[in-house]
Amino acid sequence: MQRIGVFVCWCGTNIAGTVDIDQVKQAAEKIPGVVNVQDYQYMCSEVGQNLIKNAIKEQKLDRVVIASCSPRMHEATFRKAAKSAGLNPYLVEIANIREQCSWVHKNKEEATEKAIALVRAAVAKATLNTELVPGEIGVEPRALEIGGGIAGIQTALDIAEAGYKVDIIEKTPSIGGKMAQIDKTFPTLDCSACILTPKMVDASTHPNINLYTYSEVEAVQGYVGNFEVTIRQKARSVNADKCTGCGICTDKCPSKKAESEFDEGLRKRGAIYIPFPQAVPNVPVIDREECLKFKTGKCGLCERVCPSGAIEFNQEDTLVTQKYGAIVVATGYDLINLDKFGEYPYTEHPDVITSLEFERLTSAAGPTAGKFLRPSNGNKPKKVVFVQCVGSRDKSSRGKTYCSKICCMYTAKHAMLIKEKYPEIEVYVFYIDVRTPGKNFDEFQRRAVEEYGVNYIKGMVGKVFPEGDKLQVHGVDALSSETLIIDADMVVLAAATKAKDDAQELGRKLSISTDANNFFTEAHPKLRPVETHSAGIYLAGACQGPKDIPETVAQSSAAAAKAIGLLNKGKLVNNPCVSQVDEQICSGCLACTKMCPYEAISSQVIEVKEQGKIVKKTVAHVNEALCQGCGGCTVTCRAGALDLKGFMNRQILAEVDAICL
């Protein structure tokens, strides 16, 4: 007969306010096998843990049940306490009487009855718990950074400075991301390029950092500490080792009809191009859809004028396979498509622009060399209207329900930049409400109103009508209920941010989840904000949700710290709660191999004795290093040959029986 201890936590009033602790204790004392029952206000505290440790030693407990909050919160805490007292940590069972009980009930009698049932179930499972011993796996001392924006660069630099090799994969021809497109940053109005470019150069020249630009993740296999990633390096048609970045090829290219992605389509670029002047690496790439050589077989002028012979039209994509101990995802964000917002004629009128297009128009390296001019006629505008929350906080199917977080601040920045260069321009900002949650952000936004005289109007724009060479903006002042009509020269739309279009596809490759808006999901919003549910894979920057640059950089360093901590261990203790196969009853159908999201199950041929003869039999085999203990295979197995250690079928059924008493 086991000697089981039950410890009931009040969790302040989170549990005790709804559950009668004394009744739970009295009921627990009557359960067969329970020899010690205690309660405490905060069982996770040092005092509470000492109660558990002392009881294990003094009462010679061989099983422990903690009636408290979710095991996601403190299971590791209680396991450590049990281990320090000499008890196998996997003989600890958690009865969740907070999230699954007290928090979802208002009636104290019902909550107490349910809490008692959950404790009974936990005790029933604990009686069948067995000692589990985790194994050890090695860690590849190399990290992969997916995304080469400021988040990826900062993460890579931090990991590299700790002495570990880092590879950066960037989808575009150059690292830099969205920050490279920005002219000034809030709330300091310092030059974005001036603070980003040195970091880009540091990343490209650091001995521990290797850049895979114009590349994508093709496939990911393996597990924490031992990921195997296949990288597709797309053909640049330019030999990066030979290219000197002289720029002759880009100047001589006769096909200059493609829209520049970096300049948001506000100017044309050649078929062979370098995205922007500070690009890293400073090596051009040939757009094969625009290149006359690839389209017609003629031209090839760039090859003839290249002094270093770097042009290689026959270059093909290459696949590189590398092992990594940790992966950090920092793929960034995009702006939503505004085609469905017919009230703002974005697709019809060149003077209706997005905030990112505004950045390029005011940048010294932009299409107008920093002069703020109307795209329609090249003249300086006299009135500019900014429209906030275009697609943000929008419950319709065309927009996003969340706040994009950065729009209020960058709109204030844009308004100030206009007034600083051209004080005579009238600037209006239509807003729902102003959100300035960061350090010195509120002061920055107030400067736009008080110092620069920007006209903030609380209300929404209903429609923008093109009238001759003007844009007639129809809006409402919500404070006065007055209908406003402003004859503007330009309208700037603060479009909502969104997750990358390929976020779900990348998530599937990495076996990490995305939320309803396709942003990658963290393991816990408070306690594990940069980790994912897949061990060894971390998140940084706006791929997790809307963020400004300071927050992005802070999270990037946090992700780097997590990755460094993992790489520094050398060896990892794996989770012993993994699937196991009963080879005697396995039919070899291998349905489990198809459903396993971690590719942890494969087939193997064994020899068995049947009717006095040795015959070969195909059965399922579980790689315990890959298995994450999700249990999906156990319900897939028609023969019932698969079971999950720590959550065996008989343990689960024992819980059900105990609840039904």
Image: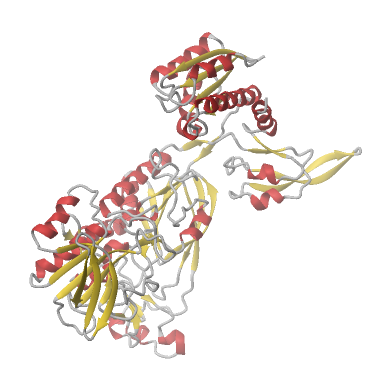
Instruction: Residue at 64%, 22% (x, y): give it.
Output: 127
Point out the image quarter for the N terminus: top right
213 relative position to 180: left or right: right
Residue 29 showing in the rendered view: yes
Instruction: Residue at 61%, 40% (x, y): give it.
Output: 624
Instruction: Residue at 76%, 39% (x, y): give it.
Output: 583
Q: Where is residue 322 shown, x and y percent of the image? A: 49, 55
Q: Report the label total.
A: 0
Q: Is residue 210 above or below residue 349?
A: above
Q: Is residue 647 above or below residue 291?
A: above
- Report the front residue among 84 and 385: 385
Residue 370 showing in the rendered view: no
Q: Where is residue 74 shown, x and y percent of the image? A: 46, 30
- Report the front residue among 103 and 260: 103
186 relative position to 394: left or right: left
Quadrant in the picture for residue 35: top right
The colour style of the image is secondary structure
- Report the front residue among 515 and 530: 515
Q: Is residue 264 above or below residue 96?
A: below
Q: Where is residue 60 shown, x and y percent of the image? A: 56, 11
439 relative position to 305: left or right: left
Q: Where is residue 88 shown, x and y percent of the image? A: 56, 22
